[in-house]
Amino acid sequence: MKRYTIAVLPGDGIGPEVIAQAVRVLEAVGERFEIRFALDTCPVGAAAVRTSNSPLPPETRRAVTRSHAVLLGAVGDPTLDDAPRELRPETGLLTLRKLLDVYANLRPVAIHAALAGCSPLKPDRLRGVDLLVVRELTGGLYYGEPRGRNGKRAINTLAYTTAEIERIARVAFDAARGRRRLVTSVDKANVLEVSQLWRETVTQVGRAYPDVRLEHCYVDTAAMRLVSDPASLDVVLTENMFGDILSDEAAVLAGSLGLLPSASLGDGAGLFEPVHGSAPPLAGRDVANPVGAIATVALLLRHGLNLPAAADAVDDAIAAALDAGARTPDLARPGDQIIGTKEMGSRVVELVLAEALEGLS
Ligand code: IPM
Ligand code: MG
């Protein structure tokens, strides 16, 4: 029997609720595919600040460094908005990304046919939309030095090296080979020197991929294209801050931020988290959509553990649940029957196990 250790970091707000459902699905996968998942559950974010006075306590650091993959819910708590940076929940997440050196954040956006009516975009704009945001995750403005604030003046630094750009560009080109073979690299090269280096370096890396088409696009144009002609995009390659902004915009296409998963990869254990945040107003009410967290389990199985059949089983179960009309409040249209977080989890679990029975018959 295969065995894997997974560090589970539920985090804040709706994180624990959606992760509870994701874990049930992971356990169903274990049952169906005879895989043993040893779960190591640890605090992160505001939850950890409360118990250990640190958003990434030493026990959590130890757990993630000895795991095969990390599953994280969400971090963020408005009551800590004025806390010093070392005590902010987001600092826990940023430190974790750096600790694992997960420089490549993959955020796939596909339109589920049964949910086409959930997006604010007209259905004809959504036809054929299937894109992947490849966001650089451990550099740029989030980490640049110097940084800080001095009374009425504050500073952050945008810096990238050729090596940092090369490694994320290779991830994008490799991903494009398994897709429609188009990379759209997003920058602001008409203004920023960093973007000029970005453009030059991506072009250089692209020479090794003659079978992949490369285009460059300014970030403002990319923001517009994402909503005016999203089907024209395949792999969107960009730096940390632009990727943060564009990936939330891209999530609107799918109908709800609550649907989208992400994988953050480096050379060691990967970090897997839904794209959505901690959504404090929804916490504890059994209304959050766990599909993003469950789809994140599929990415963990596919990219973190190299178990594609198990990953497909989870994706198929999600699709079947949505096809059968399972709708959390964020997806509900007039007349729909609404279900809660736990019930959505139950439906996916049942389908993961039902597919197993089908496989036997
Ligand atoms: C995301 C989030 C994080 C980010 C926050 C919580 C630090 O918005 O994963 O997109 O900006 O990277
Ligand atoms: Mg974000």
Image: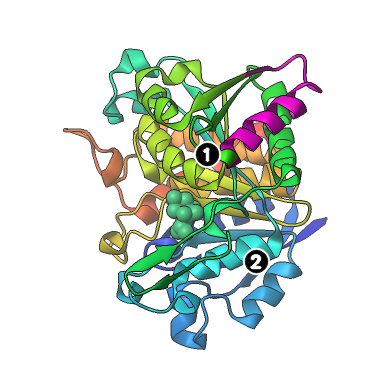
Q: Residue at x 48, y 35 (%)?
A: 191
- Mark 1 lies on a secondary structure that is loop
Closest to the observer, 83 or 27 = 83
Is residue 324 visible in this depiction of the protein?
no
Q: Which residues are magenta?
A: 194-214
Q: Main secondary structure of the magenta part?
A: helix
- Decide if residue 143 is on the left or right side of residue 325: right
Give how far apart the Cα atoms at labels 1 and 2 are.
39 Å
Q: Position of residue 125 (x, y in %)?
A: 35, 16
Label disc, if present, on residue 207 of the rendered structure: none
Q: Which residue is mark 1?
A: 192
Residue 208: within the magenta? yes
For the N terminus, which image quadrant? bottom right
- Decide if residue 133 is on the left or right side of residue 178: left
- Which image quadrant is residue 106 in? top right
Instruction: Answer above or below: position of 259 versus 51.
Output: above
- Which image quadrant is residue 203 in? top right
- Which image quadrant is residue 47 in? bottom left
Q: Residue at x 47, y 46 (%)?
A: 244
User: How many residues crowd mark 1 within 10 Å: few (<14), some (14–19), many (20+)?
Assistant: few
Q: Amino acid at mark 2?
A: Ala
Mark 1 and mark 2 lie on one chain; the one further toward the N terminus is 2
Instruction: Answer above or below: position of 177 versus 255.
Output: above
Q: Amino acid at mark 1?
A: Leu
Q: Residue at x 40, y 41 (%)?
A: 248
- Mark 2 lies on a secondary structure that is strand
Q: Position of residue 43 (x, y in %)?
A: 53, 75
| 1 and 2 marks in contact (CB < 8 Å) | no
Closest to the observer, 31 or 75 = 75
Q: Position of residue 352 (x, y in %)?
A: 57, 42
- Decide if residue 49 is on the left or right side of residue 165: left
